[in-house]
Image (cartoon, rainbow, N blue to C red):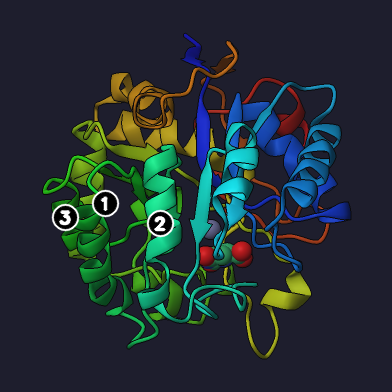
Amino acid sequence: MPLLLDSPLDMHLHLREQEMLRLVAPFSAAQFAGGVVMPNLVEPVDSLARLRAYRTAITAACDPVPFTPYMTLFFREYSREELLAARDAIIGLKLYPAGITTQSEAGVSDFDRIGATVALLEELDIPLLVHGETNGFVMDREHEFLATYQWLAETFPRLRIVMEHITTAEAVALLDRFDNLAATVTLHHLMITLDDVAGGLLQPDLFCKPIAKTPRDREALCAAVFQGHPRLLFGSDSAPHPRHKKECCGCAAGVFSAPVALPMLAQLFEEADCLERLQGFVSTNACAFYRIIPPPKTVELQRKPWRVPEQYGTVRPFLAGRELRWSMPDKQEQS
Ligand code: DOR
Ligand code: ZN
């Protein structure tokens, strides 16, 4: 029996530009009705003009497959006029602490100065999406950032805040203390721990920010997702880098999971005996929190094994070489 999903959404996605955009966007368009597109391009997407041009490029890269790019602006100090003008074109602002990850140098270096812009977001009902890591010890960064999430959630109670790509048991617990918090969870953080990244020979394909954590953290994420927590949203954080930027001295952070996202999620949910909860995780929860109605698009998965290619263009995908149980009809299985 095929598995049918109504308008699945990827609520955290890096599509890049130019040739890389044209290589990776079709994987997301094949599997999802839409996705939240991250603004950390080489030159950040921090103006409405750049955002509109980027949106056009994304739609062209997906053509002829329909895919709704839910656009984000890179967080900086914005005026009310700028935010009012952008409001209908964006799903939110994405805040990066300065230098915390790929192309985030223009991010926030002083959290004492963000209050005015965040207050405007609350007033204008524009969600705030946050890369929640400090620049402390790598395993403690998310833990150390929780105080900032708590401050945001308490100080701006009507602001909708998305804790992006959470990786810890503690972050799941914080979600339950504030109704105005939601969180995205990636596929890879449901599957790997630090041991997979660095426990044996170093695995550049699995190196990402935030770094994968402990077995206990992974289990807490899985438990909450598989139990159908209504404010956990799927966001792949698929972040392609060419092999020469991964397999070198100074490996770039990012897992390219777009080609395997839905098939592998279906397998995980099936193994956890909760396949009926996949729809909530990949669509319903996001629609409710973000108050969006994506264009109708039924995506079908078939129970037919396929082997993930070793490489797509210049990029190695997550789970390269692995056989997966569920596949997308045609295209990918031919690869
Ligand atoms: O691993 C990551 N890669 N984490 C991020 O936050 C950014 C992303 C990228 O853009 O490559
Ligand atoms: Zn990301």
Q: Quadrant of the C terminus?
A: top right
Q: What kind of residue is marked 1?
A: Phe
At 86% from the left and 34% from the top, the residue drawn is: 60
Q: What kind of residue is marked 3?
A: Leu
Between the residue at mark 3 and the residue at mark 2, the CA separation in whole angstroms equals 20 Å
At 84% from the left and 45% from the top, the residue drawn is: 22
Q: Nearer the viewer, residue 244 or 89?
A: 89
- Residue 156: which numbered mark, if any? 1
Residue position marked by numbered label 2 in the rendering: 118
Residue position marked by numbered label 3 in the rendering: 174
Kindly state the secondary structure of the residue where label 3 is placed: helix
Which is nearer the N-term, disc 1 or disc 2?
A: 2
Q: Nearer the viewer, residue 188 or 168?
A: 168
Q: Is mark 3 within 8 Å of ligand 1?
A: no
Query: How packed is label 1: few (under 14 Cα within 10 Å), some, or many (20 or more)?
Result: some
Query: How packed is label 2: few (under 14 Cα within 10 Å), some, or many (20 or more)?
Result: many
- Which of the 4 image quadrants contains residue 291? top left
- Residue 119: which numbered mark, if any? none
**Percent position of residue 260, x then y:** 57, 41
Q: Are marks 1 and 3 in contact (CB under 8 Å)?
A: no
Q: Nearer the viewer, residue 260 or 299?
A: 299
Horizontally, is 200 left or right of 93 in the view? Answer: left
Q: Are marks 1 and 2 in contact (CB under 8 Å)?
A: yes
Is residue 130 shown to the viewer in this render? no
Closer to viewer: mark 1 or mark 3:
1
Query: How packed is label 3: few (under 14 Cα within 10 Å), some, or many (20 or more)?
Result: some
**Percent position of residue 90, x then y:** 59, 39
Task: Using the image, determine if residue 21 lies above or below residue 100.
Answer: above
Q: Nearer the viewer, residue 37 or 251?
A: 37
